[in-house]
Amino acid sequence: MNTRWPLHRSIGIGIILIGVAPVIYSAARIFSHNWVPLSVPLRLVPGEFHSPEFKTDINDGRYLVELRLSELPNLEREKCEMGIPLGRCESIDQTVDFDWQVVSIDGETVQSGQYKLLFFGGVEVGFGEFRAKRGGRYKVLLHVRRDAGELNTANPTLVVESGGEYWEEIPDLYGYSLLWAKYVGGLGLLWLLLPVCFMALRRRKDSRVDDRC
């Protein structure tokens, strides 16, 4: 029994697979890592804060330590209190002040420092970074020196995320792959359907001829 597919069907399926392959690849990239292994609320009041343990999955990967807040009614004042330079903060003191450490599960200090802006955007501030191993387990320790006052009503969240170099191109890649799938995959589908449509039209034409006879 011959189970081989017709050549046109094999070509059409091949074109469809070529069309959807980039989508599958980019989706696999998206779900292959935990890009934000830690996101935990905290209160910025004097004392010690120990985050839950988190696991990293990028080998020798760069991870960023960030502080994120929700927006308060007086956004300009909020940014000044976070230490974001606006040029209009002369009369508003920075109220975020802490030392930080990233420690391994064995208690080894991986990186440490004092709260200082590395980058910012909106009400998100990156203040630290460290290198991590795949499968490594870590904690973030904070020694808060000062009460952040009203900023504690802005839902402060301590976040650890992978460096942007690992994921920033993925949304663009996914978008382009969808366009590729739309046109190339559509071409493959059309390649499969056209012979079927022609065959149906031929049968319909033949049946009309038979009816006349």
Image (spheres, rainbow, N blue to C red):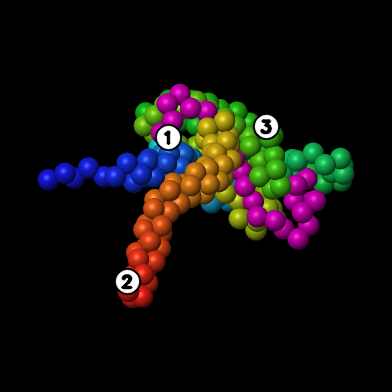
The residues tagged by marks 2 and 1 sit, at their Cα atoms, a distance apart of 72 Å
Query: Which x, y percent locates residue 52?
Result: 43, 44
Q: Earlier in the sequence, mark 3 or mark 2?
A: 3
Q: Is 77 contained in the magenta span? A: yes
Mark 1: which amino acid? Thr
What span is colored magenta in the figure?
A: 56-80
Give the Cα separation between the discs numbered 3 and 2. 81 Å
Q: Secondary structure at mark 2?
A: helix
User: Label 2: few (<14), some or many (≥20) within 10 Å?
Assistant: few
Residue lying at 63% horizontally and 31% vertically, measured from the top left: 114
Q: Amino acid at mark 3?
A: Leu
Q: Considering the image in quadrants, where does the C terminus appear? A: bottom left
Residue 15 visible? The answer is yes
Instruction: Tell me residue 63's x, y (percent).
Output: 53, 32
The residue wearing badge 2 is 210
Is 111 positioned to the left or the right of 135 in the image? right
The residue located at (82%, 46%) in the rendering is 92
Residue at 42 percent across and 41 percent down: it is 15
Which element is circle 3 on?
Answer: loop
